[in-house]
Image: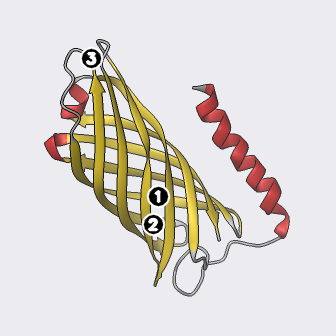
Amino acid sequence: MKKLVTIPVLLMFAGVFAFGQTGQKAVKSSDNSLYAYSNAIDVAYETSFPMGNLSKGSAASWVGTTARYEFNLGSGFDGMITSGYLSFATSSQQSYSAIPIMVGAKYHFVAGWYGMVETGVHFFTSSGPTAYNNPTEWGFSVGTGYEIPLSKLLSIDLATKYQYNTDNLSYWNARAGLMFKF
């Protein structure tokens, strides 16, 4: 667990020292996005709290990492493609994991603040006494977040969302990422 927390913190400090000396100030571009960038890669640590049918066998939260590719669509909109790995801590020797593959969009409505929507699939796996047949579930999410600029090319991305999947395999999610813009 210490490694999961230590690695993102080290990456953040490395980014601050590598890019933080440019003297660039955070400015809002004319199209209402935080910076005028074409693409970004966002690597994040996530904590998810099971809801619905997923909460029946889970004793605690999920943890995992995701990577997100973002591309500018203009007028404050960004497209997103997200994937990663989430693992649930469970009771009674039960284990669950999921690989989400999501596409979506986010809109910067105020400098830094954004709203987002995503849709896609989760590939679930489970083992233990009440394991299910490893379904692939379609779902969607809605959420909000805030980008904290560290330099012109580096930001911290904090977000939260509600993820609904078919068969009510749903969860609430908190995400802390490091965004590299290019």
Image coordinates of residue 121 in percent, x first then y, are 28, 52
Q: Quadrant of the rendered structure where residue 6 is?
A: top right
Q: Nearer the viewer, residue 147 or 131?
A: 131
Asked if marks 3 and 1 touch (Cβ < 8 Å), the reply is: no
Image coordinates of residue 148 in percent, x first then y, are 62, 60
Q: Which amino acid does label 1 sit on?
A: Gly
Q: Mark 3 points at which residue?
A: 128
Task: Farthest residue to the left: give it.
Answer: 167
Residue in view at x 82 percent, y 54 percent? 17
Residue 123 relative to residue 147: left or right: left
For marks 3 and 1 on the same chain, the one whose residue lies earlier in the sequence: 3
Asked if marks 2 and 1 touch (Cβ < 8 Å), the reply is: yes
Q: Quadrant of the rendered structure where residue 151 is?
A: bottom right
Query: Which is closer to the viewer, label 3 or label 1?
Result: 3
Q: What element carries label 3?
A: loop
Q: Residue 145 carries which label?
A: 1
Residue in view at x 47 percent, y 38 percent? 64
Q: Is residue 31 above or below residue 127?
A: below
Q: In this view, does 158 lie above or below 34?
A: above
Residue in view at x 77 percent, y 49 percent? 14
Q: Residues within 10 Å of mark 2 (few under 14, many from 20)?
A: many
Q: Is residue 65 above or below residue 29?
A: above
Q: Distance between the residues labelled 2 and 1?
A: 5 Å
Q: How far apart are marks 2 and 3 (CA)?
A: 40 Å
Task: Farthest residue to the front: give it.
Answer: 133
Image coordinates of residue 20 in percent, x first then y, are 80, 61
Q: What element carries label 2?
A: strand
